[in-house]
Amino acid sequence: LGGVDKDTYTVMGRLYSDRKEWSKALAAFERQLVTPGSRYDRFVAGETEALTSLERQGFEVFFGKGLCGSCHHGPMLSDFAFHVQGVSDDYASIAPNFPGKDGAGHDFGRFHADPIEFSDQKFAFRPVTLRNVELTPPYFHSGSAATLADVVEFYNRGGLGAQDISDADLSAEGAVRDSLVRPLGLTDREVAALVAFMKTTTAPIAPGPGGLDLSTVPGRVPSGLLPPGVPTP
């Protein structure tokens, strides 16, 4: 700790001793985001009229032709495993000056966590929960899909569009696209139905302390740091 003065060292010690309190605070916040009261929950509980006919069609496509339910299933609508999909980072248009996690404008996903242990998992990412997904755009690891319709279109073309990572580029990095990511042949009606169905997972989030809306980026935080997207005063 060379160069750290006594007062700073004392503060560091307090922070270290408070790490259990941090864990409790994070857990308390995350519990506020559990939203079991969606129309989707009511539907799977047997309330068939909780969904419209379009949303019910979306449910059938989601767990059938669309293959979505292969990875997005269970209470949280995610298998929490890692899959290589071939989604482009698209940092050139999203964040032109961002060098990527590899320093050259790319993100290799799980590989970055441990390049030795996960040497065969470049471009592998974990599917997010679809609960309240309507409220959390943009989508994919880099935010390259602006809307849920964009997400569905990626899967509909099997990740083989000009803007996606090609099989050849994946292979060059020792990666193989998940076999579930393949052209689906969905009609415009089925795409619309899928999007409508995913929005049925939206449910009210209990307000935090003082009525704080936990589903939006706050205008300020206790530390005084500016949250992402909040302009400098």
Image (tube, grey):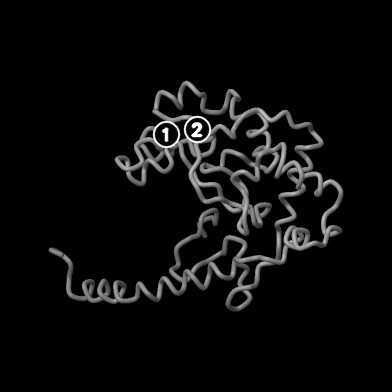
User: What residue is shown with label 2?
Assistant: 92
In the rendered view, does 172 fall on the left or right side of 56? left
Residue at left offset 49%, top offset 39%: 95
Circles 1 and 2 in contact, beta carbons < 8 Å: yes
Residue at left offset 56%, top offset 64%: 219
How many residues crowd around disc 2 within 10 Å: few (fewer than 14), some, or many (20 or more)?
A: few
The CA span between labels 1 and 2 is: 8 Å
User: What residue is shown with label 1?
Assistant: 105
Does 97 sit above or below residue 210?
A: above
Label 1 amino acid? Gly
Residue at left offset 26%, top offset 71%: 12
SS state under label 1: loop
Residue 66 screen position, x and y as percent: 69, 38
Residue 70 or residue 18, whichever sits in front: 70
How many residues crowd around disc 1 within 10 Å: few (fewer than 14), some, or many (20 or more)?
A: some
Between marks 1 and 2 in the image, the one whose residue lies nearer the viewer:
1
Residue 71 screen position, x and y as percent: 59, 45
The image quadrant where one finds the N terminus is bottom left
Label 2 amino acid? Ala
Mark sitting earlier along the chain (1/2): 2
Residue 185 screen position, x and y as percent: 72, 28
Q: Quadrant of residue 106?
A: top left
